[in-house]
Image (tube, helix red, strand yellow):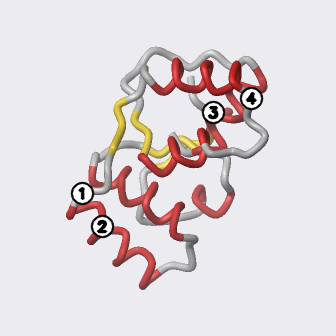
């Protein structure tokens, strides 16, 4: 799952279908470093993130990120998240239109997740 999907799911009270979910360390950093995050929101995020498998930046993720950045016009955080998804052979859950339109990625829009 990318960062915006988690934020949307939390804000809308969306219950995710039971499955194995992954998050990139970048998503965790983006969520927990938001400057307006209060202690209660941080606690909720940490509890939620504890249910996901965290993907660090391995050598393989780093190399895939570099290749993506060289060939596509994506921001570095998005490139890392996309690379992490590809390396895990996972479907990326997002609401980001730019990511939804990538032709080399297995991707699903959050609202279509069932």
Q: Look at mark 2 in the image and give the residue it sits on.
A: 62
Q: CA distance from mark 1 to mark 3?
A: 30 Å
Give the number of the disc on residue 58.
1
Q: Mark 3 or mark 4, which has the lower sequence index?
A: 4
Q: Nearer the viewer, mark 3 or mark 2?
A: 2
Q: Look at mark 3 in the image and give the residue it sits on.
A: 112
Q: Look at mark 4 in the image and give the residue it sits on.
A: 38
What residue sits 68% from the left and 58% below the top? 97
Which quadrant of the view contains residue 80? bottom left
Q: What is the number of callouts on the image?
A: 4
Q: Nearer the viewer, mark 1 or mark 3?
A: 1
What residue sits 57% from the left and 71% below the top? 75
Which quadrant of the view contains residue 21? top left
Residue 43 picture location, percent across and down:
60, 20
Q: Mark 1 or mark 3, which has the lower sequence index?
A: 1
Q: Are marks 2 and 1 in contact (CB under 8 Å)?
A: yes
Q: Mark 2 or mark 4, which has the lower sequence index?
A: 4
Q: CA distance from mark 2 to mark 4?
A: 32 Å
Q: Is residue 112 above or below residue 85?
A: above
Structural crowding at the residue carrying mark 3, measured as other residues with C-alpha within 10 Å and reported as few (<14), some (14–19) or many (≥20): few
Structural crowding at the residue carrying mark 2, measured as other residues with C-alpha within 10 Å and reported as few (<14), some (14–19) or many (≥20): some
Structural crowding at the residue carrying mark 4, measured as other residues with C-alpha within 10 Å and reported as few (<14), some (14–19) or many (≥20): few
Give 29 or 85, whichever is nearer the viewer: 29
Give 35 or 104, whichever is nearer the viewer: 35
In the orientation shown, which residue stands out farthest toward the left? 59
Residue 85 picture location, percent across and down:
38, 50
């Amino acid at each position: 799952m990318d960062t915006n999907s988690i934020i949307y799911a939390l804000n809308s009270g969306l219950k995710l279908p039971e499955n194995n979910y992954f998050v990139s360390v970048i998503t965790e950093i983006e969520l927990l470093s938001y400057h307006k995050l209060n202690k209660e929101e941080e606690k909720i995020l940490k509890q939620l993130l504890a249910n996901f498998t965290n993907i660090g930046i391995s050598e393989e993720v780093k190399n895939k990120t570099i290749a993506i950045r060289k060939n596509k016009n994506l921001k570095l955080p998005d490139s890392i998240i996309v690379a992490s998804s590809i390396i895990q052979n996972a479907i990326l859950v997002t609401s980001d239109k730019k990511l939804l339109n990538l032709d080399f990625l297995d991707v699903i829009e959050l609202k279509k997740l069932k």
